[in-house]
Amino acid sequence: MDMKLLIIGNDADLFALFRKEFSAEETDLGLTGDIAEAMKFIAQHRPNVAVIDLDVQEGTGLEALRLAKEVDPSLSVIIVTGSKDTRQVIEAMKMGAYDYQTRPLNIHKIRSVVLKAAECNLLTRKTVRFAGGRESFGAGDGQGDVMIGASPEMLEVWKMVGRVAGSSAAVLIQGESGTGKELLARAIYNYSERHHKPFLAVNCAALPENLLESELFGHEKGAFTDAHTRRIGKFEQCNGGTIFLDEIAEMSLANQGKLLRVLENQEFERVGGNETIRVDVRVIAATNKSLVQAVKDKSFRLDLFYRLRVISFFLPPLRERIEDIPLLVELFIGKFSHLHGKSIRGIAPKALEQLIDLPWEGNIRELKNIINSAVVLCQGDILLPEDFAKLMPERDGCRHVEHSGATGDLAAYFRQILEPDFDVICRKMAGKVYDALQGELERVVISMALERSGNNQVHAAKLLGISRNTLRSRLAREMA
């Protein structure tokens, strides 16, 4: 393929790498570290692909991208950097970058990306019939986005955020509990043109069917018992903005029908009302369940599924992107050190190795809680393996019991825990041993179930195998 390739930067090694890789091709390769000179080159020679090295042009790389797309909107731009800044990825993709590659570079992957970028450029030149610049979108500052990750899986997520943030299309986010689905929804919102309008989050599993309908669409006075005044629902409150519907798979079929109408026509009626309300709201939905299976089970509408997944994200579990664990650990150490008034500088390599080796069934939420506990327990300025000692054995033991799946093993596990201290317990609680142990075990199990369920009582009750009313009565008894 005849191709013109421009490298914007001063990295001679990068230039040599590209020259070596494309030496057998009919490739016209140029290098410049001056942005003004680069723009002149683009205007005069119209290269197919430009590679911008952000590390050399710190602070000006994204500006070079913006100017390059103004000079030639069809130019395919590939960003190269060693930075792990999430916001740079999103901004670059929003401004029209074709791809974003982080160091160390995989030259075989780079070769493939460059060739595809050149093909895209040639195709664009054949189909575009007009000239003109491309405006960069305004974006939120992203300060509320604490979801980070530099693994290849997360890099693809950030690229997609940059590509879709400017649209108003519905978004479906799928992933296990604790992977950061709401944070991703907020990132999409922060970088969208709607960032100056409201963002409202609704947990579809937290409310009964009739209350959820009222929460989303509002109700008229007298629509049902206790409806003493008109209530404006979340969709009206969020007009012009973005609504995040978490645990969408828990929504009833009746409410799914109403949501489908909003997605198709941007209109609905309040509960008990006849007036048609029109809104302009972007819907972002999330679930930790398989909607495909829910459709097969007839608990989720197929037409709604297709309307929601116009743009689809899948957040990988933490165990599949262990490269991100050190970044997350650093983030949480800083956060909880400040929260608890401590001056912890980091984590010992051995302790970090222990964390990386864990399976993290609870994903980022579980890691966050572990670091919080370790920061509280830490007596120095570095998190050491012993700061996690009271957390790790419990986790290891529970994993063994869970994997065995045998009630007998669970009884043996409890016996192993109680055996060393049982005589002391009997002396201190003579005549009350049974009640005391039963009560404390129930308290701990309920507390852990609520933690695993994000304090969602419906999910916690399902996890425990008890009714929500039973769970509420147990919680009320504890508070008494």
Image (tube, rainbow, N blue to C red):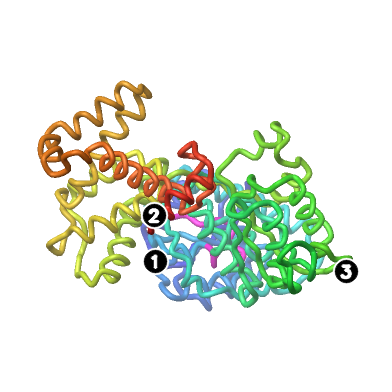
- Toward which corner of the image does residue 14 lie, by quadrant? bottom left
359 vs 338: above or below? above
Residue beneath the point at 25% across and 31% down: 414
Tell whether label 2 touches label 1 (CB within 8 Å).
yes
Q: Where is residue 96 in the image (x, y as percent from the top left)?
A: 62, 64
Task: State the mark number for residue 23.
Answer: none
Please state which of the two labelled residues, at mark 3 or mark 1, is closer to the viewer. Answer: 3
Q: How crowded is mark 3: few (under 14 residues within 10 Å), some or many (20 or more)?
A: few
Q: From the viewer's perspective, is 245 left or right of 301?
A: left
Tell whether label 1 touches label 3 (CB within 8 Å).
no
Q: What type is the residue that disc 3 sits on?
A: Glu
* Viewer can see residue 23: no
State which quarter of the image contains the C terminus. bottom left
Q: Position of residue 425 (x, y in %)?
A: 15, 40
Give the spatial CA distance, label 3 vs label 1: 57 Å
| Span highlighted in magenta in the image | 90-103
Residue ID for mark 1: 55
Residue ID for mark 3: 275
Residue beneath the point at 30% across and 29% down: 400
Give the spatial CA distance, label 1 vs label 2: 10 Å
Residue ID for mark 2: 103
